[in-house]
Every structure is written in structure tokens, then in C-alpha cells.
Amino acid sequence: MTTEHAQQSEGQGRHSRRRFLTATGGAVAGVVGGGAVGVLGSAGSAAAASSGKRVAVLGGGVSGLSAAHELAERGYEVTVYEYYDVLGGKARSMDVPGTGTGGRRPLPGEHGFRFFPGFYRNLPDTMRRIPFPGNADGVHGNLRSGTEELFALGAGRPDLHFPLRRVTTPPAPGDLTTSWIRDQVLSVLDLATHLPAYEAAYFADRLLVHLTSCDARREGQWEKVAWWDFIRAGEMSREYQVLLGIGQTRNLVATRAETASTRTVGRVIIEALILWGLLGRGMDGDADIDRVLNAPTSEAWIDPWETHLRSQGVEFVLGTEVQEVVYGGGRVTGVQVAARDGSGQRTVTADHYVSALPVEHARRTWGAALRAADPQLGRCDALKTDWMTGVMFYLRTPTPVVHGHINCLDSPWAVTGIGQTQFWDGRDFARDYGDGQAHECLSAIISEWDKPGILYGKTARECTKDEVVAELWAQLKDGLNDSGKTTLRDEDRLGWFMDPAVTGLGGSDPQNREQLLIHPTGTLYNRPSASTAVPNFFLAGDYVHTDVDLATMEGANESARRAVNALLDADGSGAERCHVWELFRPPEMEPLKRVDELRYRLGLPNTFDLG
């Protein structure tokens, strides 16, 4: 590719749209008609439109596209540089090569299934501003709600069906007391689990400790304590460990309960996702706890997003690797890029630069001089990533299993999954995809790649791809084919897909180019801010310090909003700042948190912390 819009001087003017499309192989979707899109108020876009400032966004995943979206609405000229030939990063869906016949689309694959918890509010706001035919609220209208989660147990043990519905009579404002919360937690645990009463009571009390802890204690004490230790999982039953420890960390966010930060697990997973979700507080409108898309991700979201951004003047340079962010004279002076195969190395320039690469790729582009200019960049080397990758199984028979997600609690590889086609109400899977034989796409994710499986006795990294698939299928059957029913049948399995970013399995050096940020204790202290000490360089990505504090699409979107706001401040722009939603803070807990703040300063434990 030779198109380098960001390298132009301001006097040269913009590339014509025809020239850009020619240089990028004409890879652009048709304009999407219909729908509605939210726009900036006139004071915002008009103030920025005259600036003519150019921004290079490095990375075309959720954070990069979110940054490009906000900048384009404020009149900036944006060029996005993306490693792959398609946009969306880990969120995109991918065609399974050679599978579409008879005018059907290829079977859809993905890195892992996407879900949109109800506590997401920044990302849904962006989705409402992406037009989609027939949807008054843009691609947001493509979200569908799951109604329950299945906690599948192996060895013939009864499975747990957990309804994902809000309580019918939530407490009125002011009535949310610690005793009410404790009673609700105990009733849920009593109804849905077989935990001994004293273990359920202990967990409820630990939850109250976290709920009433002030921010200073959460950041100064609980960030240093592993979730496993906080809930004393090591002293409890296996069911307690699996359900409240492993199931809430390894299976959901690929981090181990033994090392995961209590602040992150307690604040985001237990409070925002589960507790406030069930109470319907701090949610995206009247959203349910768990939502998924009604079609493959790129069809329902990423492709319309690309089309909209192109219509706003955003340009994309695909198949391009960012090699180094060049620093000199107190500023970033350019970015060294090359084609994905390493050829055609060149330097592109802009007025501002937003690094929106995943942290494991971003930190490789920061040289010694840039790191010296801002020490927080060096601290990013301490951030940890791990594997969390899926396999799509294409089945002959519709196999929804449950109207929501599946969590195989006993599986050594921490397997989760979902039958996707039940939510694709605008699709007939056999009619629209593949060769017409497959009626189901069962998307499963492996979060634990370092423990032996049940079929070969090897870790997932040690297995070949075929062995990984066979082992994963065996663990799914172990969790789902019990209690006198056979949910998954070998004869129904037609094929499978795994993200080609995973390579070398079964060899001496397995690789996964698309890893996930994890949250062991102390992670908070190494997460950088969206603004840096370099006045024209900004960071976006789920590793950036955000309020949501979790490797999520919501975190990626929030970080982009913070990066754009920092850029606007540095540019002295009069454009409207991006609104940033933070996690819900129940006002009823604030007096108790103020008491705890005093106790923390005095070196005393939380009021509810009885050991």
C-alpha cells in the first residue's frame, strides 16, 4: 500500500476517495442506508471542523475504531493503520475459507464469542451512533438478551440454571441496606447451589466487606490481595472454590482466582455484572444482564461501523504493521510502518498520534527515548496477558442448550460457550451459510491453556490443533451430556474453526498473536493513563487505566473516549468532550464508605471484616 494521507502536509489537501480506494484494493462496503445516528451538538463539531488537524490511529480494533469515531465527529482528519486486512481486532468475525457454496456466505468464525453485559454504557452509546438499516438506534438494535446461564457440572452432577432476570421487586432508593443485600445473596446461593450454609454466609459477608470499602482501601489493600485469598477459597469446599472462585475469574476473564486482584473481581464481576445487574441499577437503559448480537459480529456491528466511518472521511490503511513510534524534540515525529510481510517500510506523520494497539504489541513500538519521556510506558512491561481463544463447532442439528451462556465449571480447560444461532433471528443458518448442512454454530472458549485435559492428559498448548478440538469437544460433552440426556452427538459435528492467530500448537513454541490482558494483583499500579507526558501521543486500549478496570470492549471504548478528551485538551480544542460513563456507585453505600475511609486512614479493618 502506498496511500499515506497522514504523511501529507496541510497544504497538499486530502487524497480523493477514488485514489484511496484504488491504493487499498477497493476494500470498502457499500453505503448503509436508513437508520438513525447520534451526532455531536453544533458547538462540538463546528469548533473542530476548521482545525484541519490530522490524527494517526494505530490499530483498528474496538479502541482504535472508537477513537476514530469520536475524532471524526469533531472534524479531525483520521487515518487508521491496521495489521490485518479487516477491521475489528479480536471482536471481528472471520470467514471460514472455502465453506460457502450455492450462493451462501462462508461459515462465520471468530476469536471467541462476544457478549455485552448490561452495565456497559460507553460502548452502547457508540453503537447507537452507527447507522443500520431498519434500526432507529443503529447497530445497538442488533443486541439480543440471554435469559439464563447454565453452570454445567461434570460426572453426572446436577447442572445449575441461573435465570438472568432482574428481581421483580427491587429495593426502592434508600432501602438498599447491607442486611437486605446479605439476605438476597444468601437466598440466591441457597436456591442455586449446594454450598454449606456457613460457606454461603461467609461469602455474603465478604461481599459486604468489598461493597462498603472506600476507594483508598480498594486500591491500597484489596488490589494487593488475590480473590482466592479474599474469599478464603483454600479453606472451603470444592463447590465453593469452583463456583465462587474459578468460575468467576478463570472462566470469565481468563485470570486465575489464586492471583486475580480482589478489587477488579469484586468491583466489576461481582458488583457491576451480577449484583447491580440483577437489581437493574447502573445499566444501559432497560438492558438485561447479558446481551449478544443477532448475527456474526462483523455483519451486525463492525462492517456497518467501517462504512459509517468511511462516510465521515476516516481512511484505513490495512495490512500494515506498526513498527516504531518515533520520538524526538519532546514530541512524536512520526510512526515507522511496513506491510505485514515487512516490505515497504516508511514513516507516516500526523499532528497527533493515538496508539490503540493491544498492550503486547504496543509496548514493542515504544523505543528507549519515548519510554524515557514518560516512565508509565515502561511500567506497561509488567502487564500480563494470557490465552483465551475459542473454537466454533458447526453442527448438523440446532443445539441451543440454554438461552444464554454455558459455563462448564468442572472443565480443566475452563470452558465456556453459547449456541449462537438461536439469537440470529434475521438469519436461517443453513440457508445463509456454508453448504447448507450446518444448522448450528456452537461457539466455545478455552480460558485455561496450562492444565492437563481429560482426553490426552496434555495441556492445550501441548496439543495439536486437532487434539485441542477433540479435547474441547470431550469436555463440552462431559459437562452437557449427563442427567440422562445427550445434548452433543459426535455424528452431528460437521466441522470446526479456530482463529489462525494461534499457531505452532503441539510444537516447541506455540504462539497466540491475540492474547487477553489479565488482572493479577498489582495490575492497577502499572496501567497507564490515556494521556502521556508527550503532548501529541495518547493511549487507547483495554490495558489503559479506566473506571471499568477490566479487559473488555467497554474498557477499550472508554479508554478511547479518554484519549480523545486528552487530545482535545492538548490541542486547545473547543469541541465537545466525549462523555464517559463510570460504573454505578450505589448512593446507599457512600456513608459506609466514608466511615471506612476514616478507618483505613487509622489502620483499622473494614467494619464488616471479621476475618
Image: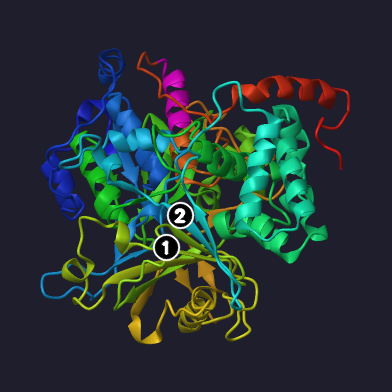
Mark with earlier residue (1, 2): 2
Instruction: Write down the quadrant of residue 344 in the picture.
Output: bottom left
Query: Residue shown at 58%/40% (left/top)?
Result: 275
Relative placement, left or right, of 341 versus 176 is left
Q: Which residue is mark 1?
A: 402
Q: Can residue 441 be seen in this snapshot?
A: yes
Front in this rendered view, residue 462 or 167: 167
The amino acid type of the residue labelled 2 equals Glu
Q: Secondary structure at mark 1?
A: loop
Relative placement, left or right, of 100 versus 238 is left
Q: Position of residue 358 (x, y in %)?
A: 49, 49
Helix, strand or loop for the magenta stretch, by majority: helix
Labels 1 and 2 touching (C-beta < 8 A): yes
Query: Residue shown at 25%/14% (left/top)?
Result: 42
Query: Does the magenta portion include 564?
Result: yes
Q: Which residue is mark 2?
A: 148
Q: Position of residue 592 (x, y in %)?
A: 73, 23
Query: Residue shown at 35%/46% (left/top)?
Result: 81
Instruction: Write down the quadrant of residue 386 in the picture.
Output: bottom right
- Coloring basis for residues: rainbow
Instruction: Write down the quadrant of residue 237 in the picture.
Output: bottom right
Relative placement, left or right, of 76 versus 216 is left
Q: Position of residue 58 (x, y in %)?
A: 40, 43
Query: Residue shown at 43%/30% (left/top)?
Result: 561
Q: Can residue 7 be seen in this snapshot?
A: no
- Identify the magenta region: 560-572
